[in-house]
Image (tube, rainbow, N blue to C red):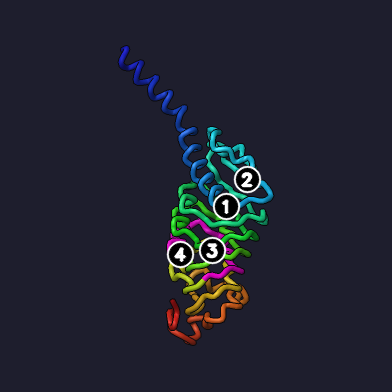
């Protein structure tokens, strides 16, 4: 009986500790982002790593289980780069970092965010390629990464994301051809414009998919 009671108490306290453990893990990931950013307007002043979880931080939204679902840092005069640790926010639905001065690349680890609905990184100075891992985001509806300095092709894997409704990659330096499969069938061509090395829709046969593209 004593051993059984002890086991029950152990389970009880373990259950109590779960939200805190999740919160600390997500808080650590977000605080890693904070340390990678310059914040002249003190937008991130409330991001205190000593708190049990980040749900009390400004610009962070959590669900009823204290899991981070939204990061709202658009138009916040932030500079710096994104961090791979963002891929640990497994319940994240909205990642809003548009209209800042971010540089560096899009971490491939963002492909782990299986609940992500909106990825808004437009109007920054992000370089590198669009990670093919974004094709794993089967809940993604909005992908707006226009007005950056992205290079390389549009990953074919994105054609398998049937939930996609809005894709904007205009004003970058992408190459290859514009996909027309899956969700791309309904994306207007002006959402691809001002990519000097991007060829016309591959359905028209104007170029093979990866011609002169790297």
Q: Secondary structure at mark 2?
A: loop
The disc, 1 or 2, on the residue closer to the chain's N-terminal end is 1
Q: Quadrant of residue 4?
A: top left
Q: Nearer the viewer, mark 2 or mark 3?
A: 2
Q: Quadrant of residue 195?
A: bottom right
Does the stretch in magenta take in 101? no
Q: Residues within 10 Å of mark 4 (few under 14, many from 20)?
A: many
In the picture, the disc for residue 44 is: 2
Q: Residues within 10 Å of mark 3 (few under 14, many from 20)?
A: many
Look at the image and tell me in which quarter the C terminus lies. Answer: bottom left
The disc, 2 or 3, on the residue closer to the chain's N-terminal end is 2
Q: Secondary structure at mark 4?
A: loop
Q: Nearer the viewer, mark 4 or mark 3?
A: 4
In the picture, the disc for residue 164 is: 3
Q: Which residue is mark 4?
A: 131
Residue at horizontal 60%, vertical 44%? 60
Mark 1 vs 2: CB contact within 8 A: yes
Q: Residues within 10 Å of mark 2 (few under 14, many from 20)?
A: some
Does the stretch in magenta take in 146? yes
Q: CA distance from mark 4 to mark 3?
A: 16 Å
The disc, 4 or 3, on the residue closer to the chain's N-terminal end is 4
Q: Secondary structure at mark 1?
A: strand
Q: CA distance from mark 4 to mark 2?
A: 27 Å
Q: Nearer the viewer, mark 1 or mark 4?
A: 1
Q: Which residue is mark 1?
A: 37
The disc, 1 or 4, on the residue closer to the chain's N-terminal end is 1
Q: Residue furthest bottom?
A: 206
**How many numbered tags mark residues here?**
4
């Amino acid at each position: 009986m004593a051993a059984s009671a002890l086991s029950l108490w152990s389970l009880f306290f373990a259950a109590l500790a779960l939200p805190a453990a999740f919160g600390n893990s997500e808080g650590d990931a977000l605080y890693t982002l904070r340390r990678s950013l310059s914040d002249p307007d003190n937008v991130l002043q409330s991001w205190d790593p000593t708190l049990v979880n980040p749900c009390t931080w400004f610009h962070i939204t959590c669900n009823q289980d204290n899991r981070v679902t939204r990061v709202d840092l658009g138009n916040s005069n932030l500079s710096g780069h994104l961090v791979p640790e963002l891929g640990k926010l497994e319940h994240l639905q909205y990642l809003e970092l548009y209209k800042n001065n971010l540089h560096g690349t899009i971490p491939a680890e963002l492909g782990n965010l299986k609940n992500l609905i909106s990825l808004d990184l437009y109007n920054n100075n992000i370089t590198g390629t669009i990670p093919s891992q974004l094709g794993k985001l089967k809940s993604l509806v909005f992908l707006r990464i226009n007005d950056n300095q992205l290079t390389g092709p549009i990953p074919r894997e994105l054609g398998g994301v049937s939930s996609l409704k809005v894709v904007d990659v205009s004003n970058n330096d992408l190459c290859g051809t514009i996909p027309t499969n899956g969700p791309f069938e309904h994306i207007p061509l002006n959402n691809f414009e001002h990519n000097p090395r991007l060829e016309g829709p591959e359905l028209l046969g104007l170029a093979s998919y990866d011609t002169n593209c790297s």
